Every structure is written in C-alpha cells, then in structure tokens.
Image: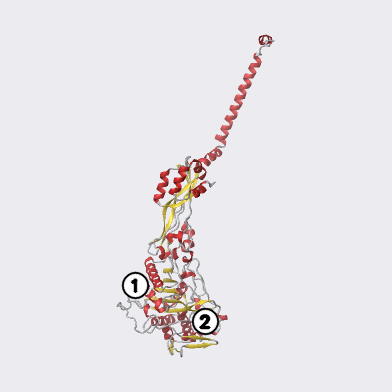
Amino acid sequence: MNTAALNATSPAPSPHLSGLRSWFVLGLLLLCFGGLTGRAVYLQGLNQAFLQAKGEARYARSLDITATRGVIVDRNNDLLAISTPVESVAATPAYASDVMTASQQKKLAKVLQMEPAELQRKLADTGQFVYLKRQLAPEQAANVVELDIPGVFLQREFRRVYPAGEELAHVIGFTNIDDKGQEALELALDDSLRGKPGTRRVLKDRKGHIVEDIEDVRAPQHGARVTLTIDAKIQHLAFRELKKAIAEHRAKAGGIVVLDAQTGDVLAMASFPTYDPNQRAVVDPSRTRNRTVTDLFEPGSTLKPFTVATALEQGVVTPATIIDTAAGQLTIGKATIHDAHPSGALSVAQVIQKSSNVGSAKVALRLPPEKMWQLFNSVGFGTMPQSGFPGEVAGRLRAHASWKPIEQATMSYGHGISVSLLQLARAYTIFATDGELKAPALIKRDYATPAKRVISVETAQAVRKMLEMAVQTGGTAPRAQVPGYRVAGKTGTAHKLEGRGYAANRYISSFVGFAPVSNPRIVVAVMVDEPGAGQYYGGLVAAPVFSEGTGGALRLMGVAHDAPVEKIVLPAAPVIKEEV
C-alpha cells in the first residue's frame, strides 16, 4: 500500500482534541511562569537577606581598621616611642593566583625581593587574605602599585620608632611586626598601649580593588598615651657615663639608676650591654635584659650604712663610739675577716669612712640578729620593689633564725645577701629623706605615694654625715665629688660568687650616693660587673660615673650649688682600699 492510499484512508484530527492540547500547553506555560514569579517574589521579597548575603559574600569584605598604638613620652613630654604609618603588600590568594600571569608573578617577586617559590607558596593560601611582604620602604610600595596586579593591594600598618634608641632600650623595650609589646614597658603596658582595632565593610571589584565603603561597623579605640618618670636628658647623661666606664675598664656589664630623692621617681635607668630597638630583627636576646631590676649581686660595703643605722637605732653605738679593728683581722670560728688596710681604733663614723670590714662586723655582732633583719627587710631587701617593671626580682635575705655569728658578721658588709641595683638605690632614700623610704615609680603619677618611715631623723642625719666623710679626703671615694655640690655615698667592692665560694679575681664595683647633702634631690646607684683593666675598687671604677652623672643631672635640674664650684683637687695619697 502506498502512502497516498494510506493517507486517504486515515481519519482527520478532531477539532476538540486539538483545542485541548492548546489549553494544556498554555496551562503548562502559565504554571511554569507562575512558579517562576512566585520564586522571584519569594527570593526578592521574602528572602531578600539571603540573596544579599550571598552577593556580599562575593564582593563585600570586612576590613580591620588598625588602632594606633599609644605614644610613650618622658616627664617633659619628649617622645620615647611613637608609631609611624607604613605600607605592607597583601593579596586575595584565590583570585590573584588565578589571574596573575607568570610574568607578573616574576616581576612582583623581584620588587618584593622574594624568592619566586616563596611568593608562590603564599599565593597558594586558601584564605581570603594573606600578607606577601610586611612594612615596605616607600619606594618599594610605589613599585608594587605600578605593577597594577589584580588581587594584590597595599595594606596600611604602623611601625614602632624609638628616638632614644639604645639609651632607653631596656626601659621601653620594643614591639614585634604585629605591633605587640615584646620587652620591658612595651610588654608590661601592652593592653593599654595597643588599643582596640575597628572594622569597616567595603565592596571590592573583581580585581580586588575597593570600590565603595558600605559602613563603619566599629570605630577603632586608639592606645593610651603613657608618660614616664624618666627624664630623657638625664638618661642620656647616665647612659653615656656608664658606657664610657664599661669601655675604659673593659667590664662585662653594668648598670645605673637615678631616683628623685623626694618622690622616688626613676629619672634614669640604664644597663649595658644594650641593643637598638629600631633594629629588632637582629636583636640579641642576651642583651635585652634590664640588669638594674632583673640581676642580683652581693652589694658589698654599700650595705655597711644599714648595719650602722640599725646599731644607732638600737642605741648600742653612737657615731663617736670607738671600735678596735686591731690589725685588720677578726676570727670567728674557722673563718677570718680581713680589712684591705689595717686602721687600728676607729670611731663608728670612721668605720663607714674607711670601709672597715672588721669594724662593721664588730658593730653587727652587738645587735640581735632579728633587729638587723628587720631593718634590712624594711628598706626592701628580699622583697619586690613594686616598680611595675616586668621581671623585677626580690633578691635574697635569709630568715634571721638561721644566721650563724659569722653569717651575721659578713652580712653586715654585704656578703650573704643579694639585691638588685634598683633595690639598693631605693634603700638609700632613707638617708636622703631623713629616714623615709620612697617607693620607686616608672609611670608618672598625679598623686604622691605615701612614704614609709624606717629610721629616725636623727639616725638618718648621722649616717648622712658619715657618708659625706666617705667621699672626702681620707675616705674611699674622693673621686665621687662633684664641683659645686656636697655629695654623700658609699663604695662597694665585692668578690663575685663562684660555685660555693668567691672568685679570687672577679669583682662587682659599686657606688651609691646622693646630692646635694644640704637638701638631697637625687639618689644615684652605679654597678660595674667584672672590670678587667686592672682597677676594680668601687672608688676608682664606679665613683667617677656617679660624679659625672650626678653633676650633669643636678645642673639640668637647675639645683642650686651648696659648695664651691672650683675644680676639685683630689688627694695625692693613694686611694683607700676596700675589698670583701
């Protein structure tokens, strides 16, 4: 059967069926259109937040607004630490790695002075943000901008700068690359200095460029301004003289502390060896220690005034009481105490002036051990100075119940006890303030800290006269004198501990004093660790540092003279030796 015959015999389509099909197709189209309309209404009207979140997830970003770290200034508002803006290079890795060509990557690595492999590793990061290079030089940052690489952009940061450099390194410390405190006061005060960062919402284009600010979500809270008690000019003088002495005597280390005698404020505090906090990428950790508060040493003869003060308070001696030092030897049990120069009969005042170990031991043995311990403890030995400086130590002062006679005798001249230089300087404030102990402070206060009375006014003034005798002809420290000012103080020359005994040829040379005697304004403590140029007596090594530093400080403070201003002529006789 052919096709024509088949078509001739097939029935024609029903008009009714054809109409149903049309309505069915139309209904199906209307149903799909209605579904799409309903979906659009749902998404655009009822679930708008969802769509907006999805869109913002692709183009919107939350960026940190860096809080500026607070500045640190000295008591005269001279800048000691300040943050300056710098540019860092960052990227959106997922986007940058896709669109960056090999040529662009090579150029970027060259500008950033990075190995291409290192740059590639950072761009392989799966996060939305990665630093490529931190804190660039301005010309480097400009070269990065010129490359105009999609997904690579500059990020504003801050770098800490320290105008005083190595002079105040041990007091101020430094921050790391994230601007977090790492040492000294930068560490101790980090929470208040750092502040709190803010955030803002922005829109970015496909190249990672910011095209619109949406909103400030949270404003940054900038760090607090910190004012120290330090005087940068006095600090410069103190550091200079300490550094000079360390070099001259080829010493291992040293430290100096200058206190305001009337308030306890720390005017200067320097340690050596030091470092430059502006070059913290190459800082040697062994140089970051502030030896004036963290290192302990046996103070030697600088402790004798406290022994005598105890005896005066207890009424067992007067300044004129004669102590027979005989041939400069005193045997207690199996041990013998020696004087570096035998002096025979000495008054108590001369025991301090000539620094007699035998005389000091004999004075101490007249005292009940608990009375000596009580005064030593009351001036801060064996307790924290509470200066607020991180790492400060309490030192060592053993309980008096365990003292043997030989231990009480040697402790009277600074053996068997350990202190920090800050503790020693603080303790001497009782002789500069008529018997009151001042609390040391590094942060400037708007109020006066109550002083603690330790000894009577009469005792303090009596010891002050003895300490003035020690720096005059016939004393151990004529080189501590300052033209134009009366000064008072005490030398120390102590053998260093070595194992269970004392080293034969290793010393700590020290001097602690105050000026002017008529109305003390500053207390200065100097310590030189292991002088190695032949001289090691405190009167030859540490006293000159005191003289230069004290004279300069008093002149800067505008303190009136209380002595002739002509140049001091030192005695022709050799220096009086002391050694414990």
State the residue lying farthest toward the left.
Answer: 566
Residue nearest the viewer, comparing 177 with 346: 177
Across and down, in percent, residue 546 comes to 39, 74
Across and down, in percent, residue 572 comes to 34, 83
Across and down, in percent, residue 550 comes to 37, 73
Crowd around label 1: few <14 · some 14–19 · many ≥20 (10 Å) = some
Labelled disc at residue 371:
2
Crowd around label 2: few <14 · some 14–19 · many ≥20 (10 Å) = some
**Element type at marker 1?**
loop
Q: Can residue 17 be seen in this snapshot?
A: yes
Q: CA distance from mark 1 to mark 2?
A: 37 Å
Across and down, in percent, residue 406 comes to 53, 84
Quarter of the rendering occupied by the N terminus: top right
Give the residue type that dot 2 points to. Lys
Give the residue type that dot 1 points to. Val
Residue located 41% across and 50% down the image:
140
How many badges with numbers are in the image? 2
**Element type at marker 2?**
helix
Residue topped by disc 1: 559
Q: Is residue 401 above or below residue 46?
A: below
